[in-house]
Image (cartoon, coloured by chain):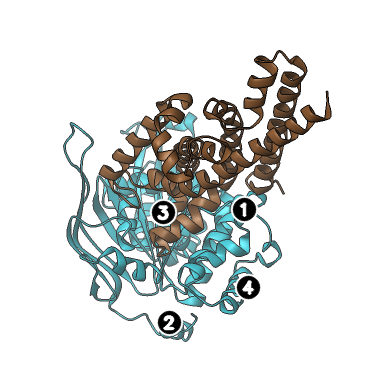
Chain colours: A brown, B cyan
Amino acid sequence: MSPDIIRLILQATADTLTMVAVAAGIGTLLGLPLGVFLATSKRGELFAAPFANAVLGALVNATRSTPFIILVVAIIPFTRLLAGTSIGTAAAIVPLTVASTPFIARLIEGAIREVDQGLVEAARSMGATPVQIVRKVLVPEALPAIVLGLTLAIVSLLGFSAMVGAVGGGGLGDLGIRYGYQRFMPDVMAAVVAVLIVLVQTVQSIGDRLARRLNKRLRHA
Amino acid sequence: MNAPLKPDAFRVGIGIPPLPEPIIRFERVGKVFAGRRGQGEVEALAGIDLDVPRGAIVGVIGRSGAGKSTLIRLVNGLERASSGRILIEGEDVTGLSEAGWRARRRTTGMIFQHFNLLSSRTVFDNVALPLEIAGTPKAEITAQVERLLDLVGLADKRERYPAELSGGQKQRVGIARALATGPKVLLCDEATSALDPETTQSILALLKQVNRELGVTILLITHEIPVIKEICDRVAVIEGGRIVEEGDTFSVLTQPRHPTTARFVEAVTGVDLPAHLAGRLRAEPRPGDAAVLRITFTGENATAPVISRLSSIIGVDVNILAGRIDAIAGKPFGSLLVSVPAREPELGAVLGALKNLELKVEVIGHVA
């Protein structure tokens, strides 16, 4: 491989990491409160608001059931509004974030619903407010599951980021398609796949290790 | 933090009886749950009248589904009454708002069957949780948590996580946590039901200590008579959402009036004939038969030397078939199955002598 190609691969790796990191970061910032709300707002729950829960739940489902490639094209006006352009790495972050937020919200909702209701009752018996219950009980207790969920979300984002090449977003997927496939350069394709494998493995093992560190349930005296 | 307990602790400490006004009073309290889709309403509690005297340990016993969990949750507003009134320290709390209840809950601790400790927090941080919720300054939290961990005997486990503790240790953490804000009332929801008998004893001893030394009133629910027998001053028996019997523990358990109570009591104080005799028991005596008597001991006369008196004074051979002496609320109680000759005048003399000793005696049958 020529130094130019290697430079391209490095640049594409950096682009992918940027897109995934920013989308996962914003997705978590938006998805965490959304997930907490979805997990606590059905009838009889801490922040009971069944109507809002149903509306947000439907919105989340609608976003999640739209194929990512269609979502990318469908929200181009919105992307242009936010990023000023609809092509390039910065623009690709917008659909990635829009796709990851409901995904992360559902993962966090699931993690929080797994928390033993007895703990919520115990906190209520101490006079905790709903906000205190979320901050001191639900989120800390769900943290190992949340970390595993975010790991899954990041791995999925690495896959999604390969598709934003279709609208001029950069990154490894774009490189693989344009050089590896369209220019018949199997070595570039192989390199792209290899880098992605390494990235996924790294993310997954960091996530697993962190979740295990945070999980105090499995220790034994 | 440590101030609010003083008046009670003072009174109990120097042996003055607790104040007559009950700390918790239920007046005709009912609770109805809205039914699931397509079903009618479910009446969980009806017409509950119950007083919990200040400084006492009161037990509510019932089978699962009898309504006892709902009853205890009415005291800290985790459930709301549908009818009737609940007075806590004379204040009607029935119509309290959620915010009003939150403030109240800080003066009422609660412990649970499955402990409900946060797995992500150390022992120290679990006990600190109610204080964090109440907004207590950090230095005060540290001092209070250390004091409580000493009280429950877990000072050396402060940095451990719940997963590293035994069931009994987890409940000790639960007790320390429930006492963190210096409550006047401790609610125990089947607190020993997940523990083995030995651990149950040690947790009950700790609860008794908390009651005597800190003057904390305890309301507990259980389905286990030994828990009632061991520490409760008063007991209420609940069945189908109603209290069917209520009174001081010794009289309720030794003279149960309701069949439900009798069934609970039988399981621990009942004595049965050995199987080979039970099968041959007949109502009418035949010549040469022995009469089988059940003698029930209560209170002081439980320790009277009954058998030796019968054989030495009246000169009758007394054969002991089965027996058990136990303590209920600290007083001896038990029953004894014996056989004596069924012929007169010996039998009449034995029955007369037992009545003179003020023992309850009953002829349950005859055997050859």
Please give the chain letter of the residue carrying mark 2.
B
In the picture as drawn, the residue positioned furthest to the right comes out as A2
What residue does disc 2 label?
Answer: B4
The kind of secondary structure element at disc 2 is loop
The reply to whether discs 2 and 1 touch (Cβ–Cβ < 8 Å) is no
- Residue B220 appears left or right of A53: right
The reply to whether discs 4 and 3 touch (Cβ–Cβ < 8 Å) is no
Give the residue displayed 24% in from the left and 75% down from the top.
B91
Residue B235: horizontal and vertical position, in percent?
Answer: 35, 60
Residue A80: horizontal and vertical position, in percent?
Answer: 44, 40
Residue A153 showing in the rendered view? yes
Q: Give the image quarter of residue B280.
A: top left
- Residue B206 appears left or right of B258: right
What residue does disc 4 label?
Answer: B146
Please give the chain letter of the residue carrying mark 4.
B
Q: CA distance from mark 2 to mark 1?
A: 30 Å
Name the kind of residue labelled 2 in the image. Answer: Pro
Name the kind of residue labelled 3 in the image. Answer: Glu
- Nearest to N terminus: mark 4 or mark 2: 2
- Identify the disc placed on residue B162: 1
